[in-house]
Image (cartoon, rainbow, N blue to C red):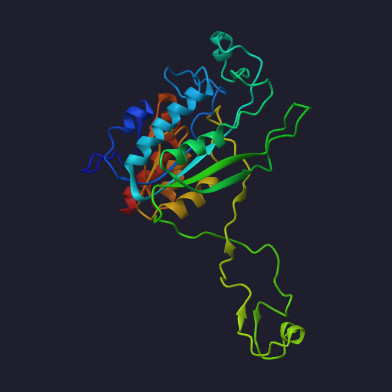
Amino acid sequence: MMMNNNIPINQIICGNTLGVLKTLPDESINCCITSPPYWALRDYGIEGQLGLEPTFHEYLDRLIAIFDEVKRVLRKDGTCWVVLGDTYSGGVNNNDSKKVYGAKTLKPIKAIGFQCKSLLQIPSRFSIMMTDHGWILRNEIIWYKPSCMPASVKDRFTVDFEKVFFFVKNKKYYFEQQFEPYQESINRWGGVYLKANGNSTWDEGTKQNTYRNRSLRPNDKGRNKRCVWQIATKPFEEAHFAVFPPTLVEPMIQAGCPENGIVLDPFMGSGTVAEVALKLNRRFVGIELNPEYIKIADKRIKPIIQMRIIRGV
């Protein structure tokens, strides 16, 4: 389904991310949510894929060029959410590409100028480069995985989180506040509401009988959502690669995209962002280099699209 302004609504375009982005109109997207391929971790078997650059500096330069285009197509009030993982410097020579890239799960590459076993801090470098290119970084969110895969290493701690970066283009942007349950009751002064009537523990302790009435829980919906999100990973049988759990995507869409708005995922993969967007009454635009992954994603999202058509949504 195409709109008059050439936005491929509710479609996944097969092609190079940067090239496809250049065909989209300026300021046509409400929200971008994506997780690019991480550097030197997996070979997805497609020529031109991101993540197989000889150095992570080249990887980051290529990634920033993509997000320069994302910035162009994003509306002035748009939001951008990026999940990005890190890589350790390994013991494989960068020039030995056959050994490095011959398998789906790659051997750790020795990063030029870095000691083996060093964490390369690619997510941090990416976020700094993004702000250098004019993005506003609003939050660095920790996606804590209570069910993470156990690590075989014995000389460091198991990494059980990934970083989620929340960027915007301008100081004023669309954002719907999200809430989470209060973690403990607030009843130190005898209840949720404190009345300045001379009878509360507060008044007895301070003698401030004329102090104003106070609500110790100003919003019944809960407290403002925090930056550590505990969300278990969720396997997806048809994909041999890592996929988003839908519960990770939901607060991003609810907070950063209005109803009936357009969510862009320039690295669509198995289609989780598209699926969640449709279920939350948003639309999507997807880009994916691998046609096999598009088949997997279409299988997930086409029944939802058909149901929306039947309902006239």
Classify residue 267 as left or right of residue 206: left
Residue 148: % across, % down: 67, 37
In front of the other: 313 or 162: 162
Hey, which quadrant is residue 85 in on the image? top right
In front of the other: 65 or 145: 65
In the rendered image, the residue lying farthest to the right is: 154
Where does the N terminus fall, quadrant-wise? top left
Residue 303: % across, % down: 40, 42
How many numbered marks have been drawn onto this rendered protein structure? Answer: 0
Residue 289: % across, % down: 40, 25
Hey, which quadrant is residue 295 in on the image? top left
Hey, which quadrant is residue 266 in on the image? top left
In the rendered image, the residue lying farthest to the left is: 4
Name the residue at 60% across, 55% down.
Answer: 226
Residue 52: % across, % down: 50, 20
Classify residue 65 as left or right of residue 52: left
**Image height of 8 relative to 196, above or below:** above
Name the residue at 41% across, 42% down.
Answer: 134
**Image height of 37 relative to 52, above or below:** below
